[in-house]
Structure formats: C-alpha cells, structure tokens
Amino acid sequence: MAELSRTGISLEQDLLTGFDKLIARRGYQNRSEALRDLIREALLSEVIDSNKPVVGTLTLVYDHHVPNLSQKLTEMQHHGGTMVLAATHVHLDHHYCLEVIIMKGKSKDIQEMANKMLATRGVELGKLVLTNSGAALKQAK
Ligand code: NI
C-alpha cells in the first residue's frame, strides 16, 4: 500500500450523520475506507467519460418467452465482436432469465451496446456498471 497522508474535512452535521448511516449500511468499518472508495469512484468516472478502455458488466433480466428475444440478444453480442469477453446465463424461474455480459472496450461503445440491449422489448431490468483496474486511476492523475 502507498504511503498514507492525513487530511481533515469540514461538513454539516446532517451530512455527516447521513454519511455515517450510509457507510454502516454498506458495512464499512470506518469513514476513511468509505471516503477512499468514494474518491476512487469519482476519479474513475473521469476515466470512464473519456475514450479510454474500460470494463463493463451488463446485467439483464428478461422474459425468455418474448418471441426472438434470446436470439436478438445473442446476435447483438456477436455483433459486438471482441468487445464481449464473456456472458453468463442463469434461468431464474419458469419465465425469467438473468444474463451478465462482461465487456472490454471504449466506454462509448460499451454504453451504446448496453443501451441497445436494455431497450430491447422483453428486457425488464438491467444495469451497466463500468469499471477498470487500479492502473487506470494511476494514469488519470
Ligand atoms: Ni434462461
């Protein structure tokens, strides 16, 4: 781990109370670790806004009884070519499927593909999470 620096911040009592409740719900042991994660997330969001390569995980929940939906989603992934690294499919129940698609590429390309899949009729829930390795944070400095 890199050398640590100490710093102090001033904030309203209400904001601090809300922050303490949030970090307790998320299971943090102390404010420092929670703040470090928030700062990392903020720094990474700047990397993600650019054209730099990122990794994206797209979670989809869909009803596989909707005609041609499974085929459409598979075709979109093939169309993405080498951007799609892996996909996992879980049959949740009689109707619903969960799919997690892991992608690597430019954030705008990943977002475009995710938006297309999320907007496909029959896809009921979903979320794209963009992330990257710690190396991207070092480059962003
Ligand atoms: Ni299924």
Image: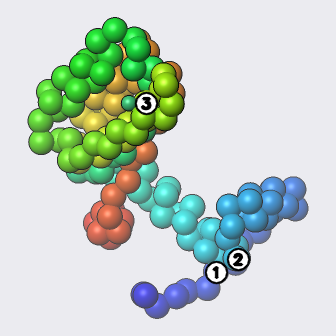
- Residue at 28%, 29% (x, y): give it: 113
Q: Is mark 3 within 8 Å of ligand 1?
A: yes
The amino acid type found where label 2 is placed reads Asn
Q: For the residue labelled by badge 1, is the local secondary structure a helix, a strand or a loop?
A: loop
Quadrant in which residue 108 is drawn = top left
Q: Is residue 113 above or below residue 53?
A: above
Q: For the residue labelled by badge 3, is the local secondary structure a helix, a strand or a loop?
A: strand
Provide the residue designation for mark 1.
7
Provide the residue designation for mark 2.
30
In the image, 8 versus 100, the foreground residue is 100
Label whose residue precedes the other's in the sequence (2 or 1):
1
The amino acid type found where label 3 is placed reads Cys
Pick the quarter of the image with the N terminus.
bottom left
- Residue at 25%, 18% (x, y): give it: 72
In the image, 34 versus 100, the foreground residue is 100
In the image, 60 versus 17, the foreground residue is 60
Label whose residue precedes the other's in the sequence (2 or 3):
2
Q: Position of 86 compared to 133: left or right? A: left
Q: Is residue 26 above or below residue 117?
A: below
The amino acid type found where label 1 is placed reads Thr
Quadrant of picture, ligand 1: top left
Provide the residue designation for mark 3.
97
Quadrant in which residue 77 is drawn = top left
Q: Is mark 1 within 8 Å of ligand 1?
A: no
In the image, 118 versus 3, the foreground residue is 118
The answer to whether marks 3 and 1 mark residues whose Cβ atoms lie closer than 8 Å is: no
- Residue at 23%, 26% (x, y): give it: 74
The answer to whether marks 2 and 1 mark residues whose Cβ atoms lie closer than 8 Å is: no
Q: Is mark 2 within 8 Å of ligand 1?
A: no
Closer to viewer: mark 2 or mark 1: 2
